[in-house]
Amino acid sequence: MTNRPQTVLVTGASSGLGAAIAAGLTAGGYRVVGTSRQPRGDGGAIPMVAMDVDDDASVAMAIGQVVALVGRIDAVVNNAGFGIAGAIEDTTSDEAGAQMCTNFLGTHRVCRAVLPLMRAQGGGRIVNVSSLAGIVPLPFQAFYSASKFAVEAYSEALRIEAKPFGIHVSMIEPGDYATGFTAHRRMTTASNSASPYHARVSRAVAIMARDEQANRDLGPVVATVRRALEAATPKLRYPTATAAQRILVALKPFLPDAIVEKLLTSTYEAG
Ligand SMILES: NC(=O)c1ccc[n+]([C@@H]2O[C@H](COP(=O)([O-])OP(=O)(O)OC[C@H]3O[C@@H](n4cnc5c(N)ncnc54)[C@H](OP(=O)(O)O)[C@@H]3O)[C@@H](O)[C@H]2O)c1
């Protein structure tokens, strides 16, 4: 237990990846506190605190409660998030803003609340949950992709800013995993049969949902978070995805844009 944090806050621990990460870390001997907008029951072995990452006051109150509960926050896994789908033309600025408010600014709210504590403690670890969609943007999930691109830029900058305080910043970049993400996905209001994009959006989102639900083993995500928490010198990025997805991500900077475009078009618009 020498080179690793003891107390870990996992946001969005009521479902999916967050629940698996919280359970996996607890089983590995960490003291974990999870968050949810509406925590139910006593959370069993994992105490749950109410936190809406869309709301500054809710985040501040939750961080205070976590510190009162476990004394300190050595590490944070910024996992809370959701996906919005629909054509760009069919997305209002309010719908786009809601996506950025949770996935990007939610991460920022939590970081701003824990950074002073970590500085005072002399160090800490922040693991932001990005996505492969934060590297390869997906058609009809433009604002989800943009929110994760924002998390990527933010994490790169924060890593440099926080390093002199002994605070390590990393990202995990999951591919497709079967979680509540598919059922919780919001379609934009104008994504209906009157939209000129309707058939294409429906097909693409069905393919995305199929791919997400096909991968039921969340173990690699938990193991990846542990690698980020336990590495003596944590890396900036930890992709966790199928071999094919990882190869595409690794090759993307070297491939002509037209090839990447063709691959994405054939994946989400074929047949
Ligand atoms: N599943 C995938 O294939 C995949 C791939 C790449 C990245 N990711 C990322 O992984 C993270 C977790 O998603 P998941 O797949 O596990 O989906 P999920 O099963 O739907 O879980 C989402 C979690 O986020 C919480 N949440 C959502 N909005 C929130 C808000 N405003 N404030 C606080 N908590 C909020 C939910 O808690 P409550 O509803 O209880 O508040 C829930 O615990 C997300 O950042 C997602 O973008 C997922």
Image (tube, grey):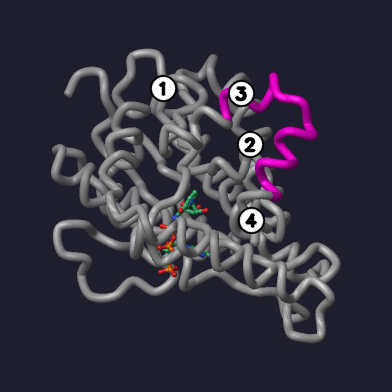
Q: How many marks?
A: 4
Mark number, residue 251 = 3
Q: CA distance from mark 3 to mark 4?
A: 19 Å
Coordinates of residue 113 in the picture (x, y in percent): 53, 45
Reading the image, the residue beneath label 2 is: 135
Q: Please name whichever residue, 245 or 271, is drawn nearer the observer in this view of the structure.
A: 271
How dense is the environment of label 4, judged by Cα within 10 Å: few (below 14), some, or many (20 and up)?
some
Q: Reading the chain from its start, which is encountered first: label 3 or label 4?
A: 3
Q: CA distance from mark 2 to mark 4?
A: 17 Å
Question: In the picture, which quadrant includes the C terminus?
Answer: bottom right
Asked if disc 2 is less than 8 Å from ligand 1, the answer is no
Given the image, on which type of amino acid does mark 1 rest?
Answer: Gly
Front: mark 3 or 1: 3
Q: Is residue 122 magenta?
A: no
Reading the image, the residue beneath label 4 is: 268
Reading the image, the residue beneath label 1 is: 122
Considering the numbered disc 3 on the image, is that residue within a helix, a strand or a loop? helix
Q: Reading the chain from its start, which is encountered first: label 1 or label 4?
A: 1
Coordinates of residue 173 in the picture (x, y in percent): 49, 38
Q: CA distance from mark 3 to mark 2?
A: 11 Å
Q: Which residues are magenta?
A: 249-265
Given the image, on which type of amino acid does mark 4 rest?
Answer: Tyr
Front: mark 2 or 4: 4
Q: CA distance from mark 1 to mark 4?
A: 47 Å
Coordinates of residue 222 in the picture (x, y in percent): 29, 41
